[in-house]
Image: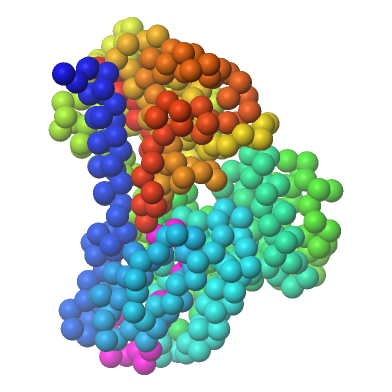
Amino acid sequence: MESAQQKLRDAAKAIFHAGLRAVEPAAAIRHHVQREENFLTVADRQYDLREFKNIFVVGAGKAGCPMAAVLEEILAERLTGGQVNVKYGHLSPLKKIHIQEAGHPVPDEAGMQGTEKILALLHRAGAHDLVIAVISGGGSALLPLPCAGVSLEDKQATTKLLLACGATINELNAVRKHISQVKGGQLARAAYPATLVTLILSDVIGDPLDVIASGPTVPDHSTFQTVQNIVEKYNLLTRLPLPVQKHLANGLAGAAPETPKADDPIFDQTQNLIVASNRQAIAAAQAEAEKRGYRTLILSSLIEGETKEVARVHAAIAKEICLSGNPLASPACVISGGETTVTLRGDGHGGRNQEFVLAAAIDIAGWPNLVILSAGTDGTDGPTDAAGALADGETIQRATRLNLNPHSFLAGNNSYHFFAPLGDLMITGPTNTNVMDLRIILAG
């Protein structure tokens, strides 16, 4: 007979997968994009396809293939062709749109080659053409084309420095925009004067269009001064590659062009639409939990901060539910979203979700009928094959029997090798979507 604890674990997984299904790219696009003969409707706008000579699809992101595939079906014979960059292994068969596999989270040469092909295609587009861009999580790393004087290696080194110091995705992307030829609205500049429609899966807290994938098709609100503030905040000024230092100094002095702003005419014929987000995944997870008889609370879709500290707050909420029935009585399900950060202090293997669950597992050790799950909706947590992990009040006890010291693994950022022998990794494989993370607390 299945134990109460196992039922909680199974329920947590089912609630997570319900959230995943809600942000499946093809369904998300079909909800917002329909075609009836010569008319293409995108949310509240309608396009007469007879007015366009060519229709191109371009883009970048982990969900690029399924997003491109559904557009091939919708546009059918009217589609001219396209070019989309995706993460290695995130493939699906396409007919007219060429797919370039590339590196993520650190950009590589393949990504740069794919981006050059995208620009070459956009340079073909004229005033009587339609360009549809598909953007999803990972799009910033997968759309690399450094500015003049900065090499791909310089950009890789800059990205690694920012990741290692715990910079937020907003901060990381502000820097990326200002050492790029395509980010921060510059892809829209390349597409102009064609009509441009961008379909977006948001992987950024609050869904700011200028931050998602570094905003390649929207006005950029960040400036060279913004970047300077970030560099100073993390004490990176003398650690950045010299060409990057020089370019940023030129930008501050007005000797390098700024990214395009809202008053630029290149944005006169653009439409940007978010087709799926973390909030949608959370809402679907909540509906699944309620269907299973849990009282539910959405904590926030805007959670960010140091992973271990956020985990301890979630663990405290879980224990408070058990002790006092606050903020809701059991059986309870608390759901949160967003994206935390990890400051690397060890050389272990893991990701923010696995580290979150390890920190929480330490705090709920010995508490019965509690389960905490955290996983990335893209199926990849850090440089691992796991989406995240799952823990309960018995996790630390089971680990101790295997001579696994949770504090040592946490200090070494080695959460993957803590959960692997316990069988508590969340392995989903590539999900072909990406709307940040889902965290689930269940109190039975």
The range drawn in magenta is: 47-63
Quarter occupied by the C terminus: top left
415 on left or right of 278 = right
382 on left or right of 412 = left
Report the number of numbered marks.
0
Asked whether residue 196 appears in the rendered view, the answer is no
- Tell whether position 299 is magenta: no
In which image quadrant can residue 428 be found? Answer: top left
The residue shown at (35%, 66%) is: 92
In which image quadrant can residue 42 be found? Answer: bottom left
Give the vertical position of 354 relative to 313 (above or below). Answer: below
Asked whether 261 or 420 is in front, the reply is: 420
Percent coordinates x, y for residue 325 in the rendering = 28, 11
The residue shown at (37%, 20%) is: 392
The residue shown at (32%, 11%) is: 368
Asked whether 299 or 239 is in front, the reply is: 239
The residue shown at (77%, 45%) is: 236
Percent coordinates x, y for residue 296 in the rendering = 25, 27
Give the vertical position of 370 relative to 91 (above or below). Answer: above
